[in-house]
Amino acid sequence: MGLITSPRNARVAHALALRTSAGRRETRRFLVEGPGAVREALGAGVVAELFRDPSVPGESADVAARAEGDGVPVLDVASRVLARLAATVSPRGPVAVCDPIDVAIDHLDPSRGVVAVLVEVRDPGNLGTILRTADASGAAGVVVTHGSVDVYNEKVVRASAGSLFHVPLVRGVHALDVVSSLRDRGCVLTAAVADGETDVFAAVAGEATAVFFGNEARGLAPDVLAQMDATVRVPMRGGAESLNLAAAAAVVLFELGRRRRGGG
């Protein structure tokens, strides 16, 4: 196939539909943009096809060559077509159509690290950043409950900086079902809340620990909070009233991970 110059091309139109939540639900696919993120998607083996501007040299061309070597269909598109496919104002490289990477909750192995449970988290930047933090802290997985932002939203994917492909991810389950599943597997269930009973720096983290984070505005619902075995808080030393959810999650995940590994 030669250079595609029109966004009305059938393959391009199919990919453009993935910019919407309805399109992602219907096809069970999503878009990944930029050389770094596409490289991670290739490493995970989930790239179905790749669009690239052949006039762009360097890292973008290297990623496209790797995709071709992996047997992934690579379509050459004009720069204006790539701009339509990309979510960023100035696209840095190829755009990939990817298959979903989420797994069933019984796929998680809580013995490998802390499990982060995000309950009705609505901000895509927060969700993507927490995925990145979970990856960096060595978490065993991330569960994103029903009512949260779509994990394949382009802003979530971008904010995760490739970590979406490194951490086992569960999506679309109800919070109380998560509670039952993780408790049945021996997890101690901990909630991170502003008025938690224990300072996170004094908390106990066992071999199997799950930490629940609530909605940015409302926190955890009372019926979920009532199921917790413990609650922890991030101590506030200065004058700030609170922390952004992603910032609080970073503190909690790194500290509980450290304590789980025997840190004093």
Image (cartoon, grey):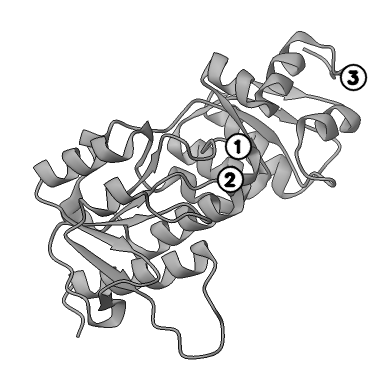
Q: Amino acid at mark 1?
A: Asn
Q: Amino acid at mark 2?
A: Val
The front one of 236 and 32 is: 236
- Kindly identify which numbered label has been placed on residue 5: 3
Screen quadrant of the C terminus: bottom left
Residue 13 picture location, percent across and down: 76, 15
Vertical side of 124 occupied by 247: above or below: below
Residue 123 picture location, percent across and down: 58, 49
The CA span between labels 2 and 3 is 29 Å
Vertical side of 99 occupied by 201: above or below: below
Which residue is identified by label 2? 156
Determine the residue located farthest toward the front in the rendered image. Answer: 222
Front tag of 2 and 3: 2
Quadrant of the rendered structure where residue 144 is? top left
Which residue is identified by label 1? 153
Q: Amino acid at mark 3?
A: Thr
The front one of 164 and 214 is: 214
- Asked if labels 1 and 2 touch by Cβ distance under 8 angstroms, the answer is yes
- Residue visible at 76% across and 36% down? 86
Front tag of 1 and 3: 1
Q: In the rendered image, is residue 118 in sight?
A: yes
- Asked if labels 3 and 2 touch by Cβ distance under 8 angstroms, the answer is no
Task: Check disc 3 and report its element: helix, strand or loop.
Answer: loop
